[in-house]
Image (cartoon, rainbow, N blue to C red):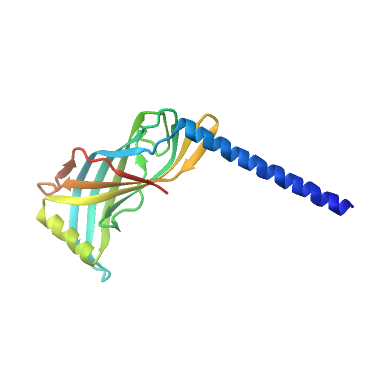
Amino acid sequence: MSGSGSRSREKTCCGRCCTLLVSLGVVVLIYWAIFQPHQIRARVDYAELSNLTVSNSSSAAAAVAVSYHVAVNLSLYNPSKRVNIYYDTLDAELRYRGAVLSPAATATSAASPAEFYQRRKAEQVVSLVFDGKGVAVPGDDVGKQLEREVKAGVKLDLELHVDARVRYVFGSIKIRQKPTVWCALSIAMPSTAGGMGILGSGDWCWVKYR
């Protein structure tokens, strides 16, 4: 009898736990429907390119080595009317035709922290700085195309990839999300050696939630 009673209590506890989880899920869905959080929007406000050099690489696995300094001001906007956002991490990479040109860069300066709180209908500008020193670019069409663009001296088409971890906050409920931001950077090449190329403003970036 005692064994039967124990199993009955276990089933009751499991049933209560399941009911609690389902109820909590329903509450979260109701809050989500009421507050209607929207996906963040992103835009490149400014980008600069300097100290750009491209040379043949000594490695057989790579055709060219590139060095550069790139600084980007990325604007993040919360369009939600009722929901605030916590940005826990921002990990950024600079790429050229899919090839990574830098290790992950984090937000810089006290005015643009890597972790910050964004209120509804608010905008935050994040400064990202990339410094590449002799970065090996694969010796296939990617490396050759990069060399051709630099020699042409017109513009350099780069890609900014940002992986973020955020929390949508409404009341005491927080929901974690992982948006990825992709931005095209078409920066004018420096007109003189040691000069600087500027992208005054860019288009809206593409944002996808994982």
Q: Residue at x 16, y 44 (%)?
A: 197
Position of 82 with respect to 205 (left or right) is: right
Position of 199 with respect to 20 (left or right) is: left
In the picture shown, does residue 77 fall above or below 48?
above
Residue 95 placement (x, y as % from top left): 28, 53
Q: Residue at x 26, y 69 (%)?
A: 59
Residue 56 appears in the rendering:
no
Q: Nearer the viewer, residue 43 or 10?
A: 10
Q: Residue at x 55, y 31 (%)?
A: 172
Residue 36 placement (x, y as % from top left): 44, 33
Quarter-of-image position of residue 143 = bottom left
In the picture shown, does residue 209 fall above or below 142?
above
In the picture shown, does residue 53 fall above or below 169?
below
Residue 108 placement (x, y as % from top left): 34, 39
Position of 210 with respect to 188 (left or right) is: right
Q: Nearer the viewer, residue 97 or 13?
A: 13
